[in-house]
Amino acid sequence: MEVQKFWTKTKIIIIASVLLVIGIIVAIIMINKSRLKNEYIKLEKSITTNVVSNHLLIEGIKLEEGQYKKIDIKSLYNSGAMTGKYNDACIGYVIAEQDTTLKSKAYIKCGNVYTTPGYGSTSTKSENTDKGQSENDTTKPVITLLGEEKMEVGLNEKFTDPGATAMDNVDGDLTKKITSTGKVDTTKVGTYTITYTVTDKAGNKATKKRTVEVKEGKSTNKKDTVKPVITFKNSSTHQTVCINESIDTSKDGVYGYSAHDDVDGDITNNVKISGVNTGSAGTFTIKYTVTDKAGNIGEASREYTVKDCSTPPQVDPNPPVNPDPPVNPDPPVNPNPPVNPDPPVNPDPPQPTTVEVTGISVPSTSITVSVNSPKNLNASVQPSNATNKTLTYTSMNPAVATVDSSGNVKGLASGQSTKIIISSSNGKTATVSVTVR
């Protein structure tokens, strides 16, 4: 009787094939896991202190010295401080701490692929529990009229409403949600009013009015001479990157924008951007330009900062110490020592001590200004003998109120409000709420 062999050639081929397939699958899984890990590490590194700083500005949260804020990473995307879509495979948070400067550290956990070392850590400082603007949205959208606020049209001529744009600090571009009421009857001489209204998701309602006068005779304004309008979602944000890093100029990003024309409508996709160069350190200006079909040019600009992030030379905190330096018991004596007729003079006398700014003082944290009637914030540094008393002023919504380098606030949009951020040279800040009447 012939005994059949178990390890036949066919069985060996089948088993080898199965093992090969298993090996390929394992290799694919390992490669994909390594790729995902690199993506998650890249996500962690993209959450810079600049992103956190812009998030706090957008949300209207002020960290005092000695405070920390725990920020869910998803909220960085919700506020617009970070662009793109958050990876749902990850959970995470940022610990932002305010000392003399703002510092932040991101912690993420992405399944069993990657976890930031120290995940679960918090801070020993005092927690800031203020709610952000996106959690407690009380700011109205800003409506900007296309064309003039007061218009004229000839009797029996056709009138075309140029429309308006609307931008909200949380919801972004709300132009398509504007509703208008009021009708212009060009068959009758008179003054007519068009009212534009828009409401954000939080229920904040904004209105803007235009008057149109129907007059005897023909209108003289036949030619399109109105410039397009470029509007930013958040005019208070400021990007700071390292040399050769990229600036976010996307229309939905931290410098998110839209462009509209009274005749051509939404022309956001026609905006040209120039002035982006991160090859050297300094503060630079991005220029936004858009042209309508009639050749009218609309312009706007934003500033950004590039800094040198190169690693400074490392200093050994524990330099080697020679416990027994050599001693010369009998140093040679020069019988004719040289005489120095001119003793050395110290060319660099001790410099005076630098006094740092510890805070910014304002008479009031809430003011009311009239349209086109400037009011000074009268801000000053503390202590009064600080070495650098320079202050910079930033309006969180220049369409509502502007502020110049001397702290003069000028109201533009009656019935609306915004905030002015005052900053010292060493990063101290103060906030003043401004209502325009």
Image: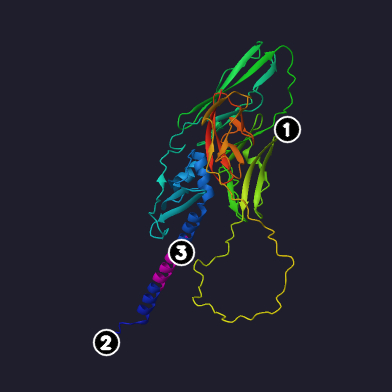
Q: Which amino acid type corresponds to the residue marked 1 in the rendered image?
A: Ala
Q: Which amino acid type corresponds to the residue marked 2 in the rendered image?
A: Val
Q: Nearer the viewer, residue 117 or 361?
A: 361
Relative height, residue 243 to residue 160 (above, below): below
Mark 1 lies on residue: 294
Q: Which amino acid type corresponds to the residue marked 3 in the rendered image?
A: Ser
Q: Residue furthest bottom?
A: 1
- The numbered disc on residue 3 is 2
Give the structural element (helix, strand or loop) at label 2: loop
Provide residue 29's location: percent of width, then percent of height.
Answer: 42, 65
User: Looking at the image, is mark 3 or mark 1 earlier in the sequence?
Assistant: 3
Q: Residues within 10 Å of mark 2 (few under 14, many from 20)?
A: few
Relative height, residue 205 to residue 386 (above, below): above
- The numbered disc on residue 34 is 3
Q: Nearer the viewer, residue 293 or 138?
A: 138
Q: Quadrant of the N terminus?
A: bottom left
